[in-house]
Amino acid sequence: MAITITAFEQSPDGGKGLARDTRVRWALEEAGLPYQVRLVSFRAMKEPAHLALHPFGQIPTYEEGDLALFETGAIVLHIAERHAGLLPTAADARARAIAWMFAAVNSVEPPILEFANAKLLEGDKPWHAERLPLVADRVRSRLSQLAARLGDAEWLDGAFCAGDLMMVSVLLRLRASGILDDYPNLAAYVARGEARPAYKRAFAAQLAVNKPPAG
Ligand code: GTB
């Protein structure tokens, strides 16, 4: 069944791969599934046709026959459950891999998003300089815990899985801040994710859409 996802017509990051369609593209590439992309403008995202697919008027969405999904965690899990390569087959290991997916979006991504939003949207507020270090501390606190758990391991729980795909995707949002560099094992973990051929294909595909014109 043909798969279609949606992505920004023009991502605000200019092709750094930070928009969330990249993680879905990555999962599809890991699973070896061909897919099509429908590009949507910010205006189109808030119109009825797209809202029928995504109640919050966002990207990415995922369509496969009669199935329409939103939320990257749910989309990646859907792909991972149906195709080899993203979840272990042993029941307990599979459950732990899914727990890491939830950890990525539920425990690690929220402080990172709060930090990104504080930098992006609150710079003009009188309390910005006081609040930013507090928000950064919450990120560091979570990263310290994650770094302690990862230790010297290559991936979070044995072989690469959808939990790693989601965690690396979430951590990538921190790259520009430099915070990740204070956690060498996490920085190396992210680099291992980026080095995967499937990630490289996903990144190149979104870059082809979003690359700023030369000159
Ligand atoms: N929880 C949802 C999921 O995981 O699918 C969140 C989806 C979401 O936040 N989508 C964003 C969106 O559609 C795009 S990815 N925003 C438009 C809107 O809400 O109107 C978030 C994103 C956007 C831009 C950058 N960037 O430029 O660096 C990074 C991440």
Image (tube, rainbow, N blue to C red):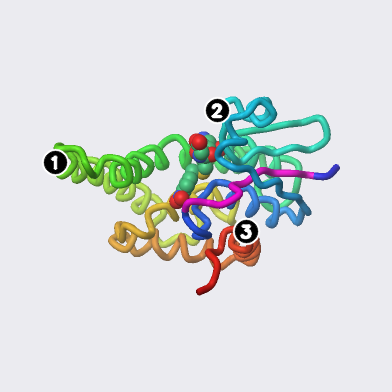
- Residue 82 in percent (x, y) is at 75, 42
Residue contact between numbered discs 3 and 2, judged by CB atoms under 8 Å: no
Amino acid, disc 2: Phe
- Residue 100 in percent (x, y) is at 51, 42
Mark 3 or mark 1: whose residue is earlier in sequence: 1
Report whether the residue tagged 2 is closer than 8 Å to ligand 1.
Answer: yes
For the residue pair 143 and 39, the one nearer the viewer reads as 39
- Drawn side of residue 140 relative to residue 102, left or right: left
Is 62 magenta? The answer is: no
Name the residue beneath numbered marker 3: 209
Q: In which quarter of the image is the N terminus?
A: top right
Mark sitting on residue 53: none
On screen, 45 above or below 8?
above
Name the residue beneath numbered marker 2: 56
Mark sitting on residue 130: 1
- Graded by Cα atoms within 10 Å as few (under 14), some (14 to 19) or many (20 or more), the crowding at tag 1 reads few
Q: Distance between the residues labelled 2 and 1?
A: 31 Å
On screen, 164 above or below 40?
below
Q: For the point 63% across and 63% down, which residue is it?
A: 208
For the residue pair 153 and 31, the one nearer the viewer reads as 31
Q: For the point 41% across and 62% down, which residue is it?
A: 152
- Drawn side of residue 30 relative to residue 136, left or right: right
Evaluate whether residue 41 shows in this view.
yes
Q: Helix, strand or loop at disc 1?
A: helix
Q: Residue 132 lies in what quarter of the image?
A: top left
Amino acid, disc 1: Glu
- Drawn side of residue 22 relative to residue 103, left or right: right
The magenta span reads 3-12
- Residue 214 in percent (x, y) is at 54, 72
Mark 3 or mark 2: whose residue is earlier in sequence: 2
Residue contact between numbered discs 2 and 1, judged by CB atoms under 8 Å: no
Q: Distance between the residues labelled 3 and 1?
A: 38 Å
